[in-house]
Structure formats: structure tokens, C-alpha cells
Amino acid sequence: MRRLLLVLVPALAVTAAVTASAGAGTQRTSLGGRLSVVLPHGWHVVRGRVSEVVDPVPRALATFHVRFARHACECGMPNLANLPRDGAFVFTWEYTRISRRDLQYFPEHAARFAIGPGAPRVSSCQMSESRNFREAGRGFQVQIYLGPDAPASVRHQLAAILDSWRLS
């Protein structure tokens, strides 16, 4: 028995160390409505009111502490007061009351997303890069805001977040 423990304990310790380092800095986070994503270190869910619109359902993620401008955008999109030059902001609409007919115009959730260097740099109410997709009978529109100096690592993290998009 003791010999078995001498072999088993180090093996379990190695497994735990590998598992911990593989997931270091990331966590599956609920966005509400049975929706979750894996957030890399440095990203967070923006809590509180992100839009005056309530349907479709708005949600947001960011790499910085978000402050909104006093006046909302007419289109319901958030009006950021402080997008850092190297920051990223992801704003989503979930179409909860979409008809099956309209849902067919949303492509299936991609297995892999890529956010290239050509993603628009925006400020205030200007439009961002948009991605639409459907998953589990629900339609999503994702708006991507990048600061002008957002590094490639932020674009890769953003793509990984979209890859990890799950409905439970």
C-alpha cells in the first residue's frame, strides 16, 4: 500500500501542476442567460447598464475599467468615454425573440474566430467590426472595439473568447 502511495501521490501532483498551469489566467465566466465564455487574464465582464436597449439583450466585456459618456448613442450602442489606445471592448446583442426564419440568416457559430489587424479602430458612437452567429437556436451580434495600439495578443485573446462561447 505504501509503495502504491509513493507512486500515486507524485503522479497526482504532476497532473495537478500541468492542469493548473494550462488554465492559469483563464476562467469560465457567466454572462447571464445560460451563456458563458472563458476570460483570459486581464479581461472582465462589464457590469451594470451598458445600453438603454433591453431587447435584444446587451452584454459587454473589456480589458479596461469602462466609463460611458453622458449621452448614449442613438442606435443603442455604448458610447465609450475612455477606450485606451491598447484596449479592447466587446459588446454583444442577444436576439432572444428572433423568429426561426430570421435566425437562419445568422451563420452557425464558427469553430475558430480570427480577429485580424484590420479590425476597425473606433471611438464614441462609431460602428465597430461586427460578427453575427447563432448557437442553440439563439442569435448573437458581437461588436468589436479596438484601441489604435491594441496588440496582436489582444486580438488573439478576443478570438479565443469568441471560440469559448457556450450555452448551457
Image (cartoon, rainbow, N blue to C red):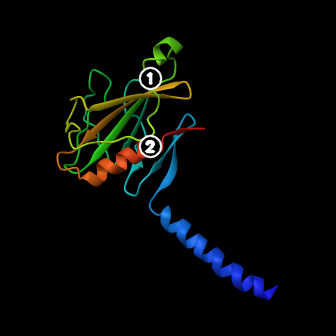
Determine contact: label 1, label 2, CB under 8 Å.
no
Q: Position of residue 49 (x, y in %)?
A: 40, 34
- Identify which residue is drawn at 46% across, 57% down: 26
Q: Amino acid at mark 2?
A: Asp
Tell me the element at label 1: loop
- Relative to 21, is 129 on the left or the right? left
Q: Position of residue 125 (x, y in %)?
A: 22, 29
Label of residue 79 in the image: none
Q: Which residue is mark 1?
A: 56
Q: Which residue is mark 2?
A: 163
N-term-proximal mark, 1 vs 2: 1
Q: Position of residue 30 (x, y in %)?
A: 53, 44
- Identify which residue is drawn at 64% across, 81% down: 10
Quarter of the image with the C terminus is top right
Residue closest to the far right: 1
Residue 64 makes an appearance in the image: no
Residue 154 makes an appearance in the image: yes
Tell me the element at label 2: helix
Which of the two residues, 130 or 54, is positioned nearer the viewer here?
130
Which of the two residues, 74 or 32, is positioned nearer the viewer here?
32
Q: Is residue 116 above or below residue 101?
A: below
